[in-house]
Every structure is written in C-alpha cells, then in structure tokens.
Amino acid sequence: MNQAPESLTTTTVQFQPVPAPATPADANLELPRTICDIAEGSPFVEEYRRPHIPVMSAFGTGQLHSCRLYGSWHLEPMVADHAGSLFRSIRKLPSPNAKEPKKEWDDLTFRFGPRAFIYADANRIIGFAVTAGEAERMVTEFGKKYHNPKPVDGGGIFYLLQFEGEIIRTREVSLSAATTLKPETLDLHYGDGCEDWHKKYAAKLCDRPNGLTILEGKPGTGKTSYLRHLMGVLKDSHRFYFIPTASMGILSKPEFIGFWADQRQYHSHKKFVVVLEDSDGALMTRGNDNRDQVNALLNLADGMLADFLRLHIICTINCSASDIDPALLRPGRLICHRVFERLNYAHAARLAESIGRKLPQPRDYSLAEVFAGHETDEIKPQRMGFAA
C-alpha cells in the first residue's frame, strides 16, 4: 500500500488530468504579444521563485496559480501514461562505463490544455492553471498516482544539493540498513564512552533549533561512517542535506537563503541538518579566500538569520580545531566538538576480531584500516634536488 505524499501545500481534491474546457473569462482573455522577463527564465527547469519560459509564455499577464507537492515520484510511468502531453523534458543517458546502464527522465513538463501545465522531477510536482483549484486538482492526482514510497526498513536518507546556474536542486540518496549501527557497537567502533556521547549529542540536535558541530579527525577515523549512522537514527525527525566540498561557495549566495526558505515552508515538521565534509578551508581563520564562507557560517549557525532558517550545521575537518576561526568556536554557537582518534592496538584488535579479521602488526589503526583488512601502502614524498 502506497504511503501518503510527504507534504501538500493545500487540501486534497480529486481530479483527472485532462484538458480543461476554457471558461468564458479564460476564453476572452487576450495574451500579451511580448513578455518582458522570459529571457531570464529557463526553457526546461522550473525555478523556486519563477515559472519557466513555456509557462510564462502561455499565461502572460493573465491569471496564473500554482500548487506544489514535495515527496518522491516515479517519472517513467508519468511519461508512459502522458507521452502525447509531454511538452518539455530532459533525458539522462548512462555513461559508457556505467555498471548498470539506465536511462533516466528528469525535468518533465506536461501540457494538458492552453493554460494547464504539470512540472515534475524526482522530488516535486508543480501544477499551473488559471485557478488555484485547478492547479491543486492536477497536482493531487499526479501525487497519488505516481508516488514512490520510501523503503521502510532501510537506513538513513540525505539530500545531495546540486547546482545548475542559479538553480539549487536536491537528489535523494538512500543509505543501506547496515550503515545504522547497533548501540552496543558504537563503543567498539569509536572507543569507550562513544555510545553515551552519541545519546547526548542526538538529544542536542533534537532539543536545540540551530547550532554548529565540528567533527575533527584524520582521514579514515570514521567521521563519515558516524554521520551515516546519525542519519539513520534521526531519519524520522530530521532532514539531512549534503553540500559537496567544491560547492561551499553557495553558502554566501542570496539564492541559498531562498532555497532554505522554501524547504522550511514545505518540510516544517522536520529539523534541518546541513553536512559539510572536509570543510577545513571554510572554517579556517578568515582571510581573503574564505571570508564570505566563514561569515555565512556564523550567520547560519547563530545569527539573526539562524532564528528564521533553524539549521544545524555539521562540519568535518582534518585539521586541528586550533586552526579554526575563533568566532566559530564561541560557546552557544558551537554545540559540539568531537575528535575522532585512531584506535590503539588493543581496541583495534578487539574490533578486528569481531569482524573476523586479524591485524598484521601491533600499532594504532584507523577505523578504515581495520575494516580494510590489510596494511596500507606508505607513500614516501619524492626528494628533489642534487645529490651531494
């Protein structure tokens, strides 16, 4: 049995998406010959604040109402059922080296009448019509018919932020159930006392509306694995968003604020967590190269903007916290700082034994080295210069 769609901006009404007859007022409505702002839009992608060109061209300065529904949707059957009404589309082809070649639809626009449009991607459905009721009926019908329910027994979920020009989009990523650890294994993976620390930290993420967390540790010490576990534990109450390292500049752009305002409106029942992996550069003491990013983090974590957006920000770093801009470490703003250490030999050997492995030599190990089950090759830096 399909689950109900995640969130609807208006109430539910039955509707079959067929071309609607023009009302007398609609039939007599003349479209303008020119649209002054269509050059700023996209012919394919529906933006958060502005309809794309086909919709703008059809409605002109006439009546235009939209209804939005966020969730998870099957696009293939949409195209199969309404191929004759498909007005705009993007088709993604697999790369030649893909393990499982699969074509995917994206950014679909259906036209069901002169002024009746449905835009759909994997995460949202938006209807455009002459009346608010018509837009709502189209979106409700599509939402019911093409809902893609999430797996119940899986692990956590996070949303990858993707950037296309000024457009910010999300792609849902589901994690396997194995990424959510049993409570008793936390101490085994991360050292004695981790289970107790995790309970207190998860409570802070639930109780506090916003704040900054810094997870420090050398590569391989398990910071990312812990985040996957956290996503599984809090998946019912929190939405996790991941910003790739190369895209951190978005933190200081105006579009970023508008995106979060929309997300907050349509997912008001959830708490938001933004994950920034390997964010050393964005947290270092302010300089000409990162001043905007540091200032943005300060405002998002504890400024007046934080009161509106209510975001928790989790940053993972490989450097020492002593190199971080002092303003980010202020009590009240920083709700947690944890150092993920390498495991001493006794603890690492106990973990290795629990997964059926044996460590090759007595020394300290990272979590990744224990699970890899073999020695890592040491890369020695190449010496340059002239021999004496």
Image (cartoon, rainbow, N blue to C red):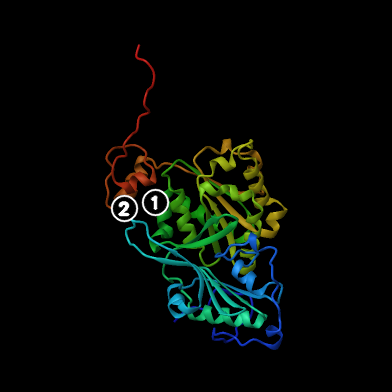
How far separated are the C-alphas under marks 2 and 1?
9 Å
Q: Secondary structure at mark 1?
A: helix
Across and down, in percent, residue 387 comes to 34, 14
Across and down, in percent, residue 64 comes to 68, 75
* Near-viewer residue (19 or 289): 19
Is 338 drawn above or below residue 39 in the view shown?
above
Q: Secondary structure at mark 2?
A: helix
Q: Residue furthest front?
A: 33
Q: Tell me which residue sits at (47%, 79%) in the image.
A: 84
Is 292 drawn above or below residue 4 in the view shown?
above
Q: Tell me which residue sits at (48%, 54%) in the image.
A: 227
Task: Tell me which label, 2 or 1, sits earlier in the chain.
Answer: 1
Q: Is residue 145 left or right of residue 21?
A: left
Mark 2 — residue? 354
Callout 1 amino acid: Leu
Q: Residues within 10 Å of mark 1 (few under 14, many from 20)?
A: some
Across and down, in percent, residue 132 comes to 67, 80
Q: Is residue 109 left or right of residue 304?
A: left
Dividing the picture into quarters, in which one does residue 241 lie? bottom right
* Near-viewer residue (217 or 61): 61
Q: Can you tell which mark lies on residue 188? A: 1
Is 8 drawn above or below residue 306 in the view shown?
below
Callout 2 amino acid: Ser
Across and down, in percent, residue 378 comes to 33, 34
Whether the residues at callouts 2 and 1 have beta carbons within 8 Å, the answer is: yes
